[in-house]
Image (spheres, rainbow, N blue to C red):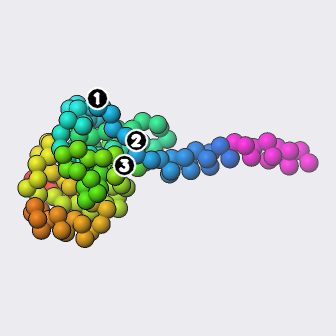
Amino acid sequence: MKKLAFILCLLPLFSACLSSETKQSEAAPVALHQHDKCHLCGMVVTKYPGPKGQVHLKNKETVLNFCSNRDMFNFALQSDNIRQIGQVFVHDIASTDWQQPDDKHFIDATTAWYVYGTSKKAVMGPAVASFSSKTAAEKFAQEFGGAVLTYEQITLALLNGE
């Protein structure tokens, strides 16, 4: 009977752990504000055209904003940072304006399609345009140039021009 009482006392603790994991997996993108600065370069995020990136760290309420997907990848792909990342979001540029992306159109970066090497101007080097569908990415690449890639195909070597 004492064991049963002990186990029943532990149930709230297990429940709290499970709800914490669920809470992390259900993180949603956070709207960018006029004065948010890029976590990597310190520039004002909303001041520049092109899709933006956002990283949510594991087991923290910390949200890191980036002025470009390029900066987001430069942070997210560093070996010290990979294990800290809970979720990553990018703008679906097929659903929003290139000059002023709408935060209602953030999507899961890991399932997005990317166009790298486009003629469209962004900030911090060649743009890494993000799309929710491969079809939209291919259409964009036909119009503005660039290669269609998956999240896994974006590497630090690629971003460094190697």
Magenta stretch, main secondary structure, is helix
Cα distance, mark 1 to mark 3? 18 Å
Q: Position of residue 71 (x, y in %)?
A: 22, 43
The answer to whether 61 appears left or right of 104 in the picture is right
Q: Is residue 3 magenta?
A: yes
Q: Amino acid at mark 1?
A: His
Q: Position of residue 57 (x, y in %)?
A: 41, 42
From what the image shows, is residue 67 above or below residue 114? above
Q: Are marks 1 and 3 in contact (CB under 8 Å)?
A: no
Badge 2: few (under 14), some or many (20 or more) residues near its Cα, within 10 Å? some
From what the image shows, is residue 63 above or below residue 21? above
Cα distance, mark 2 to mark 1? 14 Å
Q: Amino acid at mark 3?
A: Lys
Q: Residue at x 23, y 44 (%)?
A: 100
Which sits earlier in the primary sequence, circle 3 or circle 2?
Answer: 2
Q: Residue at x 61, y 47 (%)?
A: 19
Q: Are marks 3 and 2 in contact (CB under 8 Å)?
A: no
Helix, strand or loop at label 1? It is loop
Q: Are marks 2 and 1 in contact (CB under 8 Å)?
A: no
Q: Which mark is residue 35?
A: 1
Q: Residue at x 18, y 68 (%)?
A: 139
Which sits earlier in the primary sequence, circle 1 or circle 3?
Answer: 1
Q: Nearer the viewer, residue 31 or 20?
A: 31
Q: Position of residue 119 (x, y in %)?
A: 8, 55
Can the viewer see residue 83 in this picture?
no
Q: Which mark is residue 30?
A: 2
Cα distance, mark 3 to mark 2? 9 Å
Q: Position of residue 14 (x, y in %)?
A: 68, 46
Q: Which residues are magenta?
A: 1-14
Q: Which mark is residue 104?
A: 3
Which sits earlier in the primary sequence, circle 2 or circle 1?
Answer: 2
